[in-house]
Amino acid sequence: MNTDKYRYIPKYRKKIKKLCVLCVLCVSIFLLSCGKEKPPTGGPKDTVPPEIINGEPSNLTNNYNKGKIEITFSEQIDPDSFQDALIIYPTILNKRFSESKSRITIKILEKLLPDQTYHITIDNQCQDIRNNHLEDIYHFVFSTGDSIDSNSISGNISIEEGFLTTSSKICISLYSIEDTILITKTTPRSDNTFDFTNLRNDTYLISAFEDINGDLEYDFKKELFDKQEVSLIYPVQSVDLKLTLQDTTKPELKKIISKSKQHLLVEFSEEIKQIHHIAIINKVNNSELEVLETMLNGNEMDVITAIPDTVSYILVANNIIDLKNNINLSDSINFVNTMPADTNALLLTSCSPEDGTTVNNLMPSFLIEFNKIIALDNLIVDLKNCENNNSIKFNIDRIIGNKFKIQPQTKLQNYVPYKLVISSDCKDYEGNKLDKEVTINILPIIFQ
């Protein structure tokens, strides 16, 4: 028998066996990967907010005692954010959470109170796995008895004059006076009205604040606020809330920074609306250093003084008024100024309109700004007709210490070029001149 033709059969069998094992592994890996949910890796970013499709029990359900609450969303939800967003009143302490795809289940591990209306709230802290938040606060109620509480509180939100806000940034919370626990929360409608329904005959606290940065925490120095206690004597009670700044803290001097020999930067504890008087007193002989100029900007104030004759002073500020009209009648702070005189050139930092601009106005305004405070007498400018080089009369208005508005007294000629010349002889309080002469050319054109 010739066995040569069978010599390589074992080798082929080994190769076939290895190939079969490899195929089985590949198929297994494929099937395992198919069983796992993964967010898509390509395409545009998902920015669609999740929605609540269904709740179990449904809203206004009576005699509920199944021992669990189920919420079904339009997409998969981050479970941690759901727990942060969930409010249950009366409080259920013993509970366990589980999730399956887009559904979250709350297993109740304690006996619910008999004949009690429960409030379930999910606020817009809740987000999906791609960090998209719920657009609206979701709220529903159920009862463990034959009926559901039917009293309600409705109201209107108004804002303190001089402040602007949007209803989406206002958070309204309802608390129980009896146990000081949060019951539920809501936001105003587009017409600034709100309501809380399915309440028992009790006394409540309603608070509302403008949540500027969305952190759900009230900042009394920056955010508008109001609160009222409401007793449900009648089935329907109304309340009006007016959001105002509740800050009653008096503004204070915080520190003084010496920018140069004659330039001080004064910092306050908060933004300031007005200061009636600033005095700088020599600590040695009690003489007063002349204040030449002040410029207030938020919680800072630039102060330009005469040339000091010593280094140790006391700055006294009288009638410091903040944005809420809190007044500090007098405050003072010691400082030492050993800085040399400023020798840096004065700079023009902006001008509107810019050089070479066509303007559609025969009485255009030039708005110019410098990097330092300068006296009005030290602003040297000229407005000229470029065709005949004649000067044009103009008015100068000082907007703030380093900003000016220049406008011709009479109408300019149409289709005639003009130029505003800002002289290099302009100088700041310490004698530093403008680094170079600046010319701004414009052409008024009015189509008639």
Image (cartoon, helix red, strand yellow):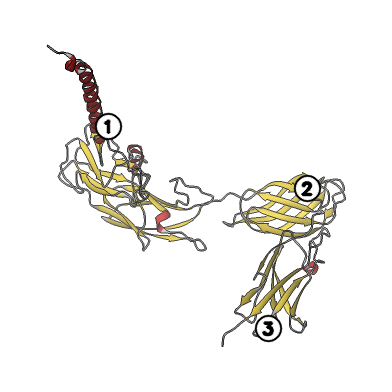
Residue, disc 2:
314
Q: How far apart, in angstroms, are the residues tagged by discs 1 and 3? A: 80 Å
Residue, disc 3:
416
- Callout 1 amino acid: Arg
Neighbour tally class for label 2: few under 14, some 14-19, many 20 plus, Cα within 10 Å = some
Marks 1, 2: nearer the viewer = 1
Give the secondary structure at mark 3: loop
Seen at 36% across and 63% down, the residue is: 191
Q: Is residue 45 above or below residue 181?
A: below
Instruction: Tell whether label 2 touches label 1 (CB within 8 Å).
Output: no
Give the secondary structure at mark 2: strand
**For the view shown, which residue lies furthest in the bottom direction?**
448
Q: In the displayed structure, does residue 224 sit left or right of residue 322?
A: left
Q: In which quarter of the image is the C terminus?
A: bottom right
- Callout 3 amino acid: Val
Task: State the residue in front, 113 or 23.
Answer: 23
Seen at 19% across and 43% down, the residue is: 57
Seen at 25% across and 33% down, the residue is: 30
- Give the number of the disc on residue 414: none
Neighbour tally class for label 3: few under 14, some 14-19, many 20 plus, Cα within 10 Å = few
**Badge 1 or badge 2: first in the primary sequence:** 1
Give the secondary structure at mark 1: strand
Relative image position of residue 215 (x, y in whole percent): 45, 45
Marks 3, 2: nearer the viewer = 3
